Image (spheres, rainbow, N blue to C red):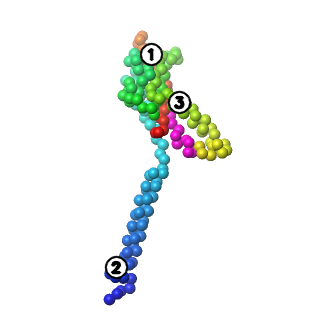
Amino acid sequence: MCKRGELGGLDMIGMIYRVAVVAVVALGVLGLFSISYEYYVDIRDAEAVILTREVSGCLIRDGVLDLGELKEHRKDVLGFCGYGRDDRLYVGVDVYGESGEKLMSLSGGNSAALWVRDLFGKVEELRGRGTVADNIDNIVKYNPGYYFVEYNVMVKVEDGLEVGRVEMEVLIKADE
């Protein structure tokens, strides 16, 4: 005996609900994949802030920057702090004395990346100025993360301790 809505033992009304649920789940999964693969999250600026904090903690112990300890690591501050060699990173540190004279410059990483920062500063100035600037949003995602900070510290020099100032800049390039 054949009931209405039933075909060969299959409940057609129940089947419609099952197909609808499978379709919604499939669209949800595809939607999540498209969002996760298309959404661009730029964390290079946050990485630069974190690296600045870590290198500062490495160089300045108990509020004192010891210049004697750093003399042989002027060109490899990242190696001194245990970061090894990474072409994505650049750290520059300038140490000034109480009278404002530069006592020491430290650097580490890929200093050639500084021109990229300067270039992107100029690209941002072009935003909204005609056809050259129409595709800036496609270019800006390669803008390196950059952070600059300066603060006062105690500097240990040969004569003892003096109040000094540290300027630190950190640049993190985009993954290649």
**Amino acid carrying mark 1 in the image:** Glu
Q: Which one is in front, 20 or 98?
A: 20
| 7 left or right of 140 in image | left
Q: Which mark is residue 10?
A: 2
Q: Badge 1, how many Cα within 10 Å: few under 14, some, many 20+? A: some
Residue located at (44% from left, 16% from top): 162
Q: Position of residue 67 (x, y in %)?
A: 42, 17
Q: How many marks?
A: 3
**What's the CA distance linking mark 1 and mark 3?**
31 Å
Q: Is residue 134 above or below residue 149?
A: below
Label whose residue precedes the other's in the sequence (2 or 1): 2
**Residue range of the region highlighted in magenta in the rendering:** 137-148
Asked whether residue 92 is in view, the answer is yes
Name which residue type carries label 2: Leu
How far across and down, in percent of the image, does residue 93 sit?
Answer: 47, 24
Q: Position of residue 32 (x, y in %)?
A: 43, 56
Residue 3 percent location from the top left of the image: 35, 86
Q: Which mark is residue 50?
A: none
Q: Between disc 1 and disc 3, whose residue precedes? A: 3
The residue under label 1 is: 162
In-image side of 126 versus 1 (left or right): right
Quick one: SS at disc 2? strand
Above or below 48: residue 2: below
- Reply above or below: 32 against 61: below
Give the SS element for disc 1.
strand
- Residue 25 colored magenta? no
What residue type is disc 3 on? Leu
